Amino acid sequence: MSVIKAEGVTFVYGQGTPFQKTALDDVSFEMREGEFVGLIGHTGSGKSTLVQLLNGLLRPTKGKILIDGNDIWQNPKKIRQVRFKVGLVFQYPEYQLFEETVAKDIAFGPKNMGLPEDEVEKRVQKAARFVGLREELMEASPFELSGGEKRRAAIAGVIAMDPDVLILDEPTAGLDPLGRDALLDQIVSYHKVRRNTVLLVSHTMEDIARIADRIIVMSKGKNVLFDDTRKVFSQGEELEKIGLQVPQITKIMMMLRKNGFPVDSSVLSVEQGFQEIISCLSSD
Amino acid sequence: MVRDITLGQYLPGSSFVHRMDARSKILLLTASVVFIFLCFHFASLLIMTGFTFLVLLGTRISLMKYLKSLRGVLLVIVVTGLFQIFYGSGEPLFEWYFLKVTMNGLVSAAFIVVRISILMMISATLTYTTSPTDLTDALEWLMKPLKLVRVPVNDIAMMMTIALRFIPVLLEETDKIMNAQKARGADMESGNLFKRIKALVPVLIPLFVSAFRRAGDLATAMECRCYDSGAVRTRMKVMRFGWRDLCALLICLTVYAAVLCCGRWLPSVF
Ligand SMILES: Nc1ncnc2c1ncn2[C@@H]1O[C@H](COP(=O)(O)OP(=O)(O)O)[C@@H](O)[C@H]1O
Ligand SMILES: [Mg+2]
C-alpha cells in the first residue's frame, strides 16, 4: 500500500509574471508505508518546493499528489486534514516558535487538530521525549533556548501532531557535527518506534547514506534517481555528474576498486568499509 | 502568495524618462502638479493634458498601466465630479427637486475630473520609472537645505534606504512563517474577523522577533564598519544632471509659459 504518491508533478513559481520559474518538472515517485526515504539534491534543485507540494502548501501547476489513492486537491476545503496527515518540518524551523512556553508551542499543532486537552498534553510530553528536550525546558520561553534546543522544540511541534508521513526539510542545517548526529539518531529511533513514513531532505550524503532505506535524487527540478540506498551510491559517477558527492568512504572504496582491489564499492559507513577491507585483505 | 505583491511600483526600463535624473523628475513633477492647478481655461487644461500624455509616452510604459492606476481613485473622481455638477452657480439648465444642474457646474465638474486624472497619471510616472533607491538618494539631496536647521537628513535618508531594502526580505519571511504555521494546522483563511486577527498572532510574533534580530545584526555590522552618519561619503551611483534633464527642463518651461500666457490673456471659464 503506497501512502504518498506524486504523479507527473510540475510546479511553476510566479506563472505569467516576468519572474516565472519552473521549480519542478514532471516529477513522479511513490513512497511505501513505513519506509525511511532520503531526498538529496543541490541547493535550488527543488527539494523544498517538492515537500511543500506533498503536504498541500503549494498546489501543483500540473500533475497530482495522491495520498492513499486520493488526490489531495480533490476538495481544497479539506486541505488542512492533509496537513495533519503529512507533517512538514521546514528548513530552520526555529523561526516558527511564538508561544510563551515551549510546552504551549509544541501544543499548537495538536490543538489546531481539535484534540481534547489531556490528549494534547500526552502528545506534547511524548514528542518532547522523542526529540530529547529536557523536562525543565518545557516551561521556559522558547526564545531563551539554545539554537539546537529551539530546533528540537520546533520539530517536536510537528511530531506532536503524530502524522502518518513525517517530512523534515534539512533538519540538521546549521547544527554542529555532534548536534547533527544526535538529532539524526533521534529521528531514526522515532521512526523505529512510530513506524510511520519519513522523508528526510538533506544535501549531505553522509547523513542520508547512513539512515535511509531508499533515496530520491533531484537535479534541476527532476527526480533523476529513486532506488535503494546502496544502489544509488554504487552509481558514483552518475552522482558526480550532477554535482553530488558520494560519502567519503564510498569514494575511497571506489578508488580501491579502480586500483585492482576486489572490494564492494557500495559501502556507506566507515564501519562497513573497515570490515570490507579486512575481509578483502584476509582472503588473499 | 505574499511575495507576489509588486514592491512599490517600479517598472524597470530604459526610456527617456527612466534615464532622467531622479532629482529633476521630482522637481519637474512638483512644478507640473502646481501648473495643473493653475489651469482655469480650456486651452491651458488642454496644454497640460497634452503635456501629460507626452510624458506618459516618454516612459514607454503601456497606457493600460496608467489607466489601472486610476482605478484606485475612481470613486473619488466620480464623487467629486457629481458634487461639482450640482454645486454650480448661475441659470439652471434643468431642476429636479432641490438638485440644480447648471452650465457652470458641468464645466467645473469636467475640469475637476480631467485635473485629478492627469494629476494621478503624471504622478505615477515618477514611481513607475524611478527605483526606490534612486528615489531616496534624490530625496536626500533635495532635503540638504534642511541640514541648516539641524534636521538629521543623512539619518532620515539612511532609515528610508534600510526600510526599502528590508521590505522584500520581510515579505519573504512572512511567507515562510505563514507556511510553517499552516503546516501545523493554523487556519488563516476562514472564521470571522476576530478569529482571523487571532490567527495572525503566530505569524506576527516570530516576524517581530526576527525583525528585531535583523535590526540588531545590521546595527552591529554598521558599527563594525565604523558607520558615522555625519561622515562625507562618495556614492557608487553618482547622480548627474544630463542632456535629458536639460531637454525636459526646456520642454516644461515652454509648457508652463504657455499656461501662464493663457491665464494672462484669456478670460477664465469660471
Ligand atoms: N517562493 C518562491 N518564488 C519564486 N521562486 C522560488 C520560490 N521558492 C523557490 N524558488 C525557486 O525554485 C527553485 C527551487 O527551489 P527550492 O525548492 O527551494 O530548492 P532546494 O530546497 O532544493 O534548495 C529555485 O531555483 C528557487 O530559486
Ligand atoms: Mg531547500
Image (tube, coloured by chain):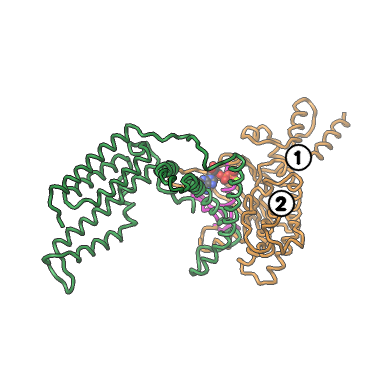
Q: Is residue A76 above or below residue B167?
A: below
Image quarter of residue A243: top right
Residue at the front extreme?
A: B149
Above or below for B53 versus A125: above
**Type of the residue with mark 2:** Gly
Which image quarter is the N terminus of chain A in? Answer: bottom right
Q: Is residue B7 left or right of residue B262?
A: right
Q: Could you say which chain is coloured green in the image?
A: B
The one nearer the camera, A189 or B108, is B108
Looking at the picture, which amino acid does disc 1 mark? Answer: Leu
In this rendering, would B169 be left or right of A143? left
Within the image, what quadrant is residue A190 found in? bottom right
Residue furthest bottom as drawn:
B97
Please report the residue visible at 56 percent of the width from the left and 48 percent of the height from the top. A49
Dot label at residue A148:
2
Label 1 packing within 10 angstroms: few (<14), some (14-19), many (20+): many
How far apart, in angstroms, are the residues tagged by discs 2 and 1?
27 Å
Q: Which residue was labeled with disc 1?
A: A268
Residue placed furthest toward the top: A259
Q: Is residue B79 above or below residue A4?
A: below
Magenta region includes residue A39:
no
**Chain appearing in orange on the rendered image:** A
Residue A25, visible in the rendered structure: no
| Local SS, label 2 | helix
Q: Position of residue B213 (x, y in %)?
A: 61, 51
Q: Are marks 2 and 1 in contact (CB under 8 Å)?
A: no
Query: On the rendered image, what quadrant is the C terminus of chain A found in?
Result: top right
Which stretch is magenta? A44-71
Residue B237 position within the rendered picture, expressed as x and y whole percent measured from the top left? 45, 35
The image position of residue A254, as x and y in percent, is 74, 31
Q: Secondary structure at mark 1?
A: loop
Along the line of sight, the residue nearer the viewer: B120 or A266: B120
